[in-house]
Structure formats: structure tokens, C-alpha cells
Amino acid sequence: MQPTVDSAPRLESTLREHLKNNNVPALQALLSAQAAPDIADLLDRLDDEERLTIFTYLPAPLAAQVLSEAGSETVRSLLAHLPPAKVGSLLDELAMDDVAHLLSDDVPQRAEQLLAYMTPEDAQEVRRLLRYPKESAGRLMTEKFVAVSPAMTAAQVIEHLRQVGRDAETLTAIYAVDENQRLQGVASLREIILAPPQQPLSEFMIQRVISVAPTDDREIVANLVSHYDFTVIPVVEDHRIIGIITVDDVLDVLVEENTEDQLRFSAVDPAEVSQPYFATNLLQVVRSRVGWLLLLFLAETTTGTVLRYFESELSRVVALSFFIPLLIGTGGNTGAQTVSTIIRGLALKEIRPRDTLRVISRELLSGLILGAAIGVIAFGRARLWGSDIQLSLVVGFTIVAIVTWANTIGSIIPLIAQRLKIDPALVSAPLITTLVDATGLVIYMLIAKALLPALQ
Amino acid sequence: MQPTVDSAPRLESTLREHLKNNNVPALQALLSAQAAPDIADLLDRLDDEERLTIFTYLPAPLAAQVLSEAGSETVRSLLAHLPPAKVGSLLDELAMDDVAHLLSDDVPQRAEQLLAYMTPEDAQEVRRLLRYPKESAGRLMTEKFVAVSPAMTAAQVIEHLRQVGRDAETLTAIYAVDENQRLQGVASLREIILAPPQQPLSEFMIQRVISVAPTDDREIVANLVSHYDFTVIPVVEDHRIIGIITVDDVLDVLVEENTEDQLRFSAVDPAEVSQPYFATNLLQVVRSRVGWLLLLFLAETTTGTVLRYFESELSRVVALSFFIPLLIGTGGNTGAQTVSTIIRGLALKEIRPRDTLRVISRELLSGLILGAAIGVIAFGRARLWGSDIQLSLVVGFTIVAIVTWANTIGSIIPLIAQRLKIDPALVSAPLITTLVDATGLVIYMLIAKALLPALQ
């Protein structure tokens, strides 16, 4: 009754033992009892040779499922060693959206070759899916849905399902279409079962069907499915239903989009590192980071300009420089906290465009409170270091000002991005930190010039 | 055919017009045509009075669904103004996991009072759910699943569903149990429809059912459901099935857990700000941030200690201080990039405990490459500012060293956290930045002492 994922290490060692003893029957029995995602995880952990041996012991339908669940590295190494004809027939067993994903992401150079070994109908469906842009609804859909005439009775629909249901991706939603495949309504299998057997579908189906276009971004699909608690959503083009997207694909999209957003938030370009950690080569890692790092470096050079401008102040009171990292570091931390709060509020649609002023004044106020709290401690710490009252006051007031300012910047920048129709998730913590650094130094030096007798 | 969420602003304005003209029939017709999540979103945007007026025009089942989908603020204001008896009967219409969530999160002080107005059976179910810890599987489950004897034939199961199906949360999975409610197997409605009518359930059901315990953390539930592409998972205690969890709740969990991780990554405590942005009061905002901010401030004071230690060097070469923010800022940005890459790799299980050394050497190497690239540019930038060759070399070499060091720290800290069984998601970007700041300054000053003739 326990989830098999918990026993993964045990599975791995038993398997290795059977492999060592060349105990093929035991190996096959063990593998057939596992779920495809678990075998896929296992293959991801093995080396090329073990992987291939085990894969060849899998019965065909299971092997196909394992292929669709395995990591890119595993897929690539398996496909490199299996005869193309065998791969073609494996791919025929899969949902075509999974084949499209596998061919375009894992083995793009071999896509055409492998398509030639699939049945012409399947290959054609994959080609149709691949015409849609990456990360679009079209790439996620399967054409294996069930569509019937709205005139059919509940009993007739059930009879129809008994004949065609095996080939469908899901029976959760049954679509009603006219003779031109134009979507007329939808009913869940549950409603069909519960309806009086002689009632026509048209009398109890839902007529206002919420759907997506094949070119819609996959994030729109994920938002709709999660907003309406769907388990499946139809893809519609010219009023005709051309496919469906199931909730398991939406779950994968959510996980992928979230890790992408997390990387972006740290100024890493997710496009370069879309493969698993070890499958990404060093060159891609460097490419994913160097662009933003360089841009931020150049932006950060303004801090040098600011400090050079105040060179005489810094040489007259060298102690001023001791507090530089502390002050701008605290500003940066505050800014990171705020920007992440705001991006989250925008993503969850808790903050709407007309709330801009309300958000900024709110963040300004909480910045003041936070700044005052940390400022008092900063004053005390500076005194403890033996700084005089004036310098300690400069440090305390600067904390108040910088924290308030960082909170304000951290809220304004993502709000501006949204107004400019730029995805606020592109605003990274390092970007805010860098902005706060240069401006924070100006604040620090101006407060110092105003309060320190030595600088007047 | 277009998703109604797109037309939200139009819905809002039409609705306000009907409200103004007091056109009740039009208002009711408009509302009945909307999906509950859309009305909930709308109510979240209205003020208390409009909200209450519109809510009272909703037919009872729709009103209940809207209540379960609305934000905390909306729920609180509605419940404060509706008679408790009316609220009790609304709650009876909901899934009891939604009621448990609503009572414990939105109106904890009024939970007991409202439970008294529900039917005793429903109230008892809610009380049972509330006994499980927050964020546990038990809080997400519903007891309204369908369980039958494994001896029943497919046709008998379908006949049974026709009688009891209306009250079930979902018919997607039908569970086979013995006379003591012990789970024997599971079959999907699809398999039951496709099976020969006279075949007993026991012959085609899946017997190794993957399940969760009611005390399991909700993240375990989310991982299993997404790993196995389930739409529903049973909750089992002492081998007996006590509830089911549906995929729509798992989607919500994923979204919540992701925003929590994102906040943690920016050193914000998500527990204090679990409400929507404007529903969180300023005190909670300050509490969610001040702890980490203070801790990081104290850690960051070590930068002052480092700089004071090198006071004589800084006063002899004031220009050294111009580069401080640039150098530690770049180190912080690199560290943030790395830590986010590693946390992601750990979360997706792409990096396993035994990979520690491989990860560190990999990050060290990519740090060296990145550092060399930025170092060359830093050298050039310092020369352009008129710094002499030696100082420019110090800046260039420091960049190489700091970037390499930041990459190493950014990978080591989350890996150590994982070894210590601390959630690596608790390692925030500000924590890494702060660590890199103090150590980066030591690196800078040591390189300066080694290379600058003025300091020898």
C-alpha cells in the first residue's frame, strides 16, 4: 500500500543483483510489477549499458511509457542504441503530444528519421503538433478524444464508448460536435452515466464550453485548468475541436514554468538550462548566466562612479567606507523581499493595475517601519564599534532611508514592467539589488555630508 | 467559445449597470450563466456592500461554490453579514475539505459557531478533517468516494453508480473494499465501462494501489499525483480507505507551495503572509520580513569588521574602496544564480546526495570560466577609470576569485542543508549574498596586499 517511490533504492539493488546473476525471468517479473514513472526514474540513475539491458527486457507498451517519462539523457542514449524500426513502433504506442515533446526536445536532429519509422497516421499527427510554436497549447494536445453527435442518447454514447474508448486518451469528457466537427457542447462521463439512458446528450450537456486556441501559450492553459478545476480542456480552431489537453500535462507545465520563473528571478536564462542538471553542458551553463551577469556588472559600475564622485569625503572620513557593504547589503536584501512579494501578488492576480498607488504607499510604509527597527540596531552597532555619535546617526538614518527606498523600488519596478506589458517575472532579485546599490550609496553620502561636521 | 475569464472587466461593468438600474431579473440571469470561480474573482474585486448584494442574488448551490472559491477577505466579509443558519446550509452544499479549509483559514474564530448550523453528519466530517495537521493529506481529502465489493460485476458497479453517484465527489476512480473497508483494489470508470459487463471487478481492478496516509505532508501527495499522472489518490489508514484527494486540490497545493518557496528564497517567512496581498496587514508583513532581515544585518556586520581590520590599507589607497560594491555585488549575483540552480536540481531530484563532489567541482569550473570572462572586462573598466595597471589587475583577479568562490558557496550551502536534513529551499539568495560579501572582502584585501606596491 506504500508508494513504490519510497522503495526506489531497494528496487535498484534487487535489480542489479538479478542483472549480475543473469536471472532474466526474475528481472522481467520484477520490472513488469513496476509503474512506468518508477522505471524511468531508475533508468535515469543507471549507466548507458545497464540502462539498455534493462530497457530491452521491458514489454513493449511499458517500454513506450518508460520512454515518455524518462529524462532527456536517458532518451538520447536509448535511442542512439536501439534500431530505428523498434523505436518507431515504440513511439506509435505513445500519446502523440508526448512523441512531439520527445522528438523536439530530446532528439531534434533525429526527429525526421524516427518519424519515417512510425505509422503514417501517427507521424502525420506528430507533424501537425510540431507546427505549433514551442510552449503553445497545440504542443500539449492529443487528437485522441471522443466526439459524438448531440442527438445520441446517454445509452448510445455509452455503447459508442465501449467500441472506441480503448483508443482514446481519456473518457472523462465527451464532446458533442456537428457534422463539421464544430464543438456544440461537453458532458462528463459521470453525467452520461447518471443521466436517464434515453435522454439525448443535447439535453444535459454543457453548451458554453471553455476552450483554448492551439496557439495559446501553455501558461494560459494551466491557468484555465486550475481556475476551473478541469481535468481536461478542448483545443478549438475555427469553432472546430482539434484536440484536448489533459490535467497531467498541465501539472508538468506548472512545475516547468515554476522552475523557469525561479531561475529568472535569480537572473539565469532558463532557455539555456532546460535540461536536467547534469545533462546541461558547461557551455550552456555559462551562456545561461553570463548575459545577465555582465549586464548587472556594467550597471553596478555606477557604484564606482558614485564613490569616485565622493572621493574627498571618503578620504577625509575613511570610516565611512566600513559601512558601505552593510548598508547596501541590507538595502539589497529588503529589495529582494519586496520584489518577490509583489511578483507573487501580480502572478496570483491579487494585485491589479489600478492598485499601483496603493501598493507603493503600502510598501513605502512597511519599509519605514522595517527601516526604523533595523536603523536603531545599526546605530547601536556603530556605537559599539567605537564610531562617534554623528557617524552612528548617519548609519542609522541611512538604514531607514535605504530600506524605505529599497521597498519602494522593489515594488515600483515590477509594477512598471507590468504596465509596459513585460512579464514581471523577468524582474530579478539581482536587478533590484544592483539598482539599490548605486542609489543607496548616493543616499548614504548625502546624509553623511549633511550630518558629519568633518565634511562641512 | 472564448474563456470567460478574458471578459471579466466587461462582466463587471454589465453587472454594475444592472445593479444601478436595480434590474434584478437581468442580474440573476447574468449571474446564473457564470462559472463559480469567475463570480468569486468578481466578488474579490467589489466592496463589501456590492459583494453582499450580488451574493444574495445567487442560487444556493452556486452561492456555496462561489464561497469555496473566493478569497479570504471576501469570505470573511460575507460570513460576517449573512445569518449563521444560511451560512450553515451553504456549507452543507460544499465538499467538506473545502469547508475545513474555509473554517480553519478564513474564519477560525467562528468555526465552532458555524459548524453548529450544519447537518450533524457534515459537521462531524469537517471535525474529523480538522483533527489532521495543517498542510497534511487529511486536510485535503473528501470522504465522498465510491467503494464497492470486488465481487460486483462491471454492470453491477455501473448500476450502483447510477444510484449513489450524485453524492460522490468524483467517479473517476471506483475503489474495491472488503467488509471492513480495507482497500482491495481500484478501477477507473473508463475501465469499468470498457470491461465485459459480466466480468467481476476483482478480475480487472489494479490491486497494488498507491495511496497516502492522512498525516502525510501535502507535498508528498502533490509529488505522487504528478509522478504517476493520477487524477485522484486514496487516503488510507490501517489499510482502510478513509478518503480521496482529487487533482484540482493538488494543483492548488502546487501553486501555494511554489509561492511559499519563492518567498523563502527571498528571505520572507511565508507563514505570516499566507493571505492575499491586501488581506495581509502591515504588522504581518513586517513580522514576515524583520526576522531574516535582522539576522542578515548582523551577519553582514562582519563586512565592517573585515574593512576595519584593513583600515590602514584603505586609507593608504582610497581608490580601493571605489570597487567594493562592484566586486561584492558581482559575487552576490553569481551566488544567487548558483544557489537557485542547485535548489532547483535538488527539488527535481536531478541532483542526489552522492553527486555532492561532482556538483561542487562543476560549479567551481563554471565559476572560473564566468569569472575569467567578467574579470577581463573588469580589468578594462578599471583602466578606463584611470586606475593604474596594478590596481586594475587587483580588480580583475578579485573578480575571478570572487565569482569562483560565490559559485562554490552557492552550491555547497544548499548541499550541506540537504545533508543536515534541512529543506534546501530555506537557503535564500540574501543568505548567500551576505556570506559572499564578507568573505569576498577578505579575498579582495588579500589580493590587494599581495599585488599593490603601495601596500607592501
Image: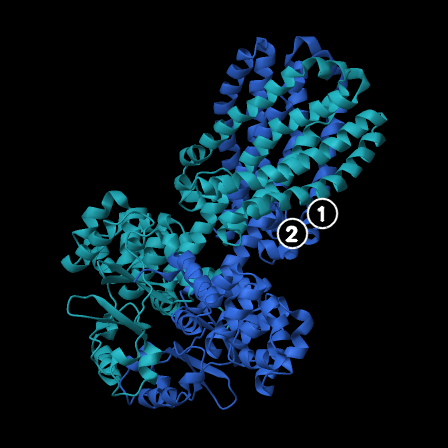
Chain colours: A cyan, B blue
A37 versus B353 height, above or below? below
Asked whether residue B207 is in view, the answer is: yes
- The structure residue drawn at horizontal position 38% and vertical position 58%, both measured from the top left corner, is B7
Of A55 and A222, the residue lying toward us: A222
Of A314 and B33, the residue lying toward us: B33
| Element marked by disc 1 | helix
Q: Where is residue A113 in the image (x, y as percent from the top left)?
A: 19, 47
Task: Answer few, some or many: residues within 10 Å of disc 2's Cα (few below 14, many 20 plus, some between 14 and 19).
Answer: many
* Quarter of the image where one finds residue A366: top right
A327 versus A320 height, above or below? below
Q: Position of residue B230 (x, y in %)?
A: 41, 68
Q: Position of residue B354 (x, y in %)?
A: 53, 48
Residue identifier under label 1: B291
- The structure residue drawn at horizontal position 44% and vertical position 66%, both measured from the top left corner, is B18
Please give the chain letter of the residue carrying mark 1.
Answer: B
What is the number of the mark on residue B269?
A: 2
Q: Position of residue B6 (x, y in %)?
A: 38, 56
Of A298 and A362, the residue lying toward us: A362
Asked whether residue A94 is in view, the answer is: no
How far is mark 2 from mark 1, CA to CA?
Answer: 8 Å
Please give the chain letter of the residue carrying mark 2.
Answer: B
**Is circle 2 on the same chain as circle 1?**
yes
Q: What residue type is labelled 1?
A: Gly
Task: Answer few, some or many: residues within 10 Å of disc 1's Cα (few below 14, many 20 plus, some between 14 and 19).
Answer: some
What is the number of the mark on residue B54?
A: none
Q: What residue type is labelled 2?
A: Asp
Residue that extends furthest to the front in the rendered view of this protein = B21
Asked if residue A233 lies left or right of residue A331, the reply is left
| 2 and 1 marks in contact (CB < 8 Å) | yes
Asked if residue B297 lies left or right of residue B198, the reply is right
